[in-house]
């Protein structure tokens, strides 16, 4: 989740075929808490997807996960012991149990926030980050994370100085 900025349901809906060379093509999410089922992405119609850059390290980790645990019959990366979809509530419970054992107070959504914060504070464009996160509008992303974007004043001065010479 941290390396892609995914929502819980989006991560639980991943399939091996979603991993392309340098990106993940996100196509579906787990949408019901009890009796999990797949559905369209938030703010998207059925059949519409979004692409998210895939770091090499994360791609390698997914390969290791598949080698160790295999996949479901439809290529699902995550499934229960009985081969069904993992409900978001069950994932949240397991996540909290692990991080509490480690002494942290993180929620699954904190990993999504980390992705956004890391991308924006390192100068990646707000519009791109907003699209990767699947926000309905860039305004929502700017309102939530705008304070993390690099101050462009110094760059603007250099650009204008160079252009006006």
Image (cartoon, grey):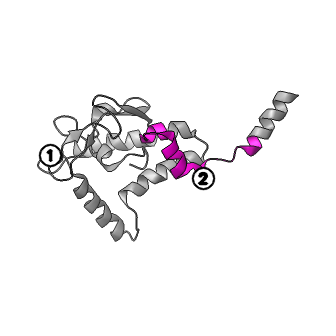
- At x 80%, y 33%, the residue is 160
Element type at marker 2?
helix
Element type at marker 1?
loop
Which residue is at the far left?
Answer: 82
**Does residue 26 lie above or below 141 as drawn?**
above
Residue ID for mark 1: 84
Q: Position of residue 39 (x, y in %)?
A: 24, 38
Residue 138 lies left or right of residue 51; in this view the side is right
Mark seen at residue 147: 2
- At x 42%, y 39%, the residue is 136
Magenta range: 130-155
Q: Quadrant of residue 11?
A: top left
- At x 41%, y 40%, the residue is 134
- At x 56%, y 40%, the residue is 126
Mark seen at residue 98: none
Q: Is residue 71 visible?
A: no
Q: Position of residue 85 (x, y in %)?
A: 18, 46
Disc nearer the start of the sequence (1/2): 1
Residue 161 lies left or right of residue 151; in this view the side is right
Q: Is residue 37 visible?
A: yes
**Does residue 85 lie above or below 75 as drawn?**
below
């Amino acid at each position: 989740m941290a390396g892609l900025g995914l929502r819980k349901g989006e991560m639980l809906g991943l399939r091996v075929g979603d991993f392309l060379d340098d990106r993940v093509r996100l196509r579906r999410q787990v949408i019901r808490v009890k009796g999990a089922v797949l559905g369209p992405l938030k703010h998207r119609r059925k059949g519409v997807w979004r692409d998210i850059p895939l770091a090499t390290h994360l791609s390698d980790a997914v390969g290791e996960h598949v080698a160790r645990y295999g996949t479901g019959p439809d290529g699902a990366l995550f499934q229960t012991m009985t081969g069904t979809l993992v409900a978001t509530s069950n994932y949240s419970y397991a996540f909290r149990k692990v991080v509490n054992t480690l002494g942290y107070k993180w929620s699954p959504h904190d990993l999504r926030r980390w992705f956004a914060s890391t991308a924006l504070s390192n100068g990646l464009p707000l519009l791109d980050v907003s699209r990767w996160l699947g926000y309905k509008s860039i305004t929502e992303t700017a309102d939530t994370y705008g304070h993390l974007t690099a101050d462009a004043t110094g760059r603007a001065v250099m650009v204008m100085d160079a252009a006006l010479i």
